Amino acid sequence: MQFKKIATATIATAGILAMLGACGSGSQGVTDTKKDKGLDVIGTNVKYDPNHLVNEGKPITIDYWTWSDKGVDPVYQLSEDYHKIYPNVTIKIKKQTWDDYWTKLPLQLKGKNGPAVFNIHNSYDSLIRPYAADYDIDQAQLEADYPSSAAHEDANGKVKYIDSVINTGNIYYNKTMWKEAGLTDADIPTTWDQFIDVAKKLTKFDGDKMTQAGFNFNGAYSAIYQGLNYQKGTLLFKDDGKQANYDNDTTKENMQFLKDMYEKDKIGSVNFGNDYSESFGQGQTAMVYAWGWLEGTMKDKYPNVDYGVFATPTFSTDTPFAYDRYNGESTPGVNKNQSKEQQAVAQDFVKYLLANDDYIRQAVKGLNSFPAKANLQNDADILKSPVMKAIQPRVSRLIWPGATPATVESSGKVAFEDATQNGKSIDEAVAEGQKAMDKDMKGSDFVSAESKYEFFSEHK
């Protein structure tokens, strides 16, 4: 953070008193009379000047709801930092389990006593959007700091949340197997043809039985096919943005391509376990396609596996329409049904977060995701991570389709299983996948965000 150090014992003492006295009723706690905090303005485009009184200095407590632990959600730490600056403000954090969160939160937001600030996952956009206030931040400044924020704008150019960090798929490879196969860093593939050649060298058999898969995507088809379609310039949704675009030549080509990896190239098998991440962690698979969450799994369950990361290959050396899709972890929402006083504090806190590099740095670390904030995308410390290093050169060519309905993945998964395990032709499997998506999306208010992609005009 770019703040000057607070050296007075008065503020430290006030902070302790606020924590003891300000919980519960907003009439208790410490009154802040010091407008000039002696602190620097922070931020690049979205700027935050801490030298002001919040809630006129009167004691106030606001609730923040989350499903995440302190090591994952940076709001825990940032709320403490904010309280040190404004001792009259207590941010009370309430953690719920994931399932309880999405059951209880909408009910709370409908009333007058719901949390003033709340964690958001964009897959539940339609559920919480009716209760979320627009950010009280200049949109041009927001876009300058967070380029992906444009994808979250409504018809009026307003946002209710944006991405703090983003993630996408990469290839994870077992370094021990890599060395045993006589491969070096010079063999890291950049095209799919090169990738298949490398995967063949990493595949082992005992007679007809595969004992080591060069590449395993069992359970990952739905994530991979979307990226492959984007690489060829085919959108996931049709022109109106409301209907899935699954039954097309590109989907069929890519399904055959993936099917051939197993049946023709024999670098993996549908019979080689159902969970690619488990197979990778247990040392049975040399390469997998996965998002950043895999690093947490490896650290917790398979700490002894020596692995590396490289960017997902493309079909040629030319720049594709998009390298892959991305998804973001969302910044907090503000409850529009809370009191004016609570909303004002919530808006001030959100602006403090978005101007503050520490908020993004902690999100990068806790969520193992790439910073959505432009000034941190070339940060040397952040780019020490192999995942961040793989994403950085491609970040402008990643596309967000929006908070896509679950059927786009689940029906795609069924279609691939039908074509590889249930004896259906690719044409038949893809056609049935499209029908399932159409049925599931009927009546949905979903509209794709693909048209907001910077290079949208390049699609087929």
Image: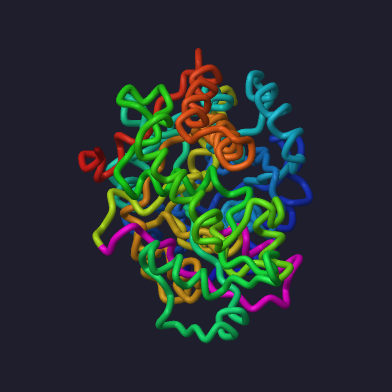
In this view, the residue in front, 289 or 177, is 177
Extreme residue toward the top, this view: 443
Q: Residue at x 34, y 46 (%)?
A: 142
> Where's residue 14, x and y in %?
68, 57
> Where's residue 327, x and y in %?
48, 46
- Does residue 318 sit above or below 286 in this rendering? above
Q: Residue at x 51, y 69 (%)?
A: 199
Where residue 412 sits, quadrant-wise, is: top right
**Residue 334 visible to an observer of this rendering:** no
Instruction: Tell me the quadrant of the picture where the C terminus can be found.
Output: top left
Extreme residue toward the left, this view: 457
Reply yes or no: does residue 298 show up in magenta: yes
> Where's residue 263, x and y in %?
54, 54
**Magenta residue span:** 292-317
Q: Residue at x 58, y 54 (%)?
A: 217
> Where's residue 158, x and y in %?
36, 31
Horizontal side of residue 97 vs 115, given as left or right: right
Q: Residue at x 53, y 29 (%)?
A: 405
Scheme by which the image is coloured: rainbow
Reply yes or no: does residue 352 show up in magenta: no
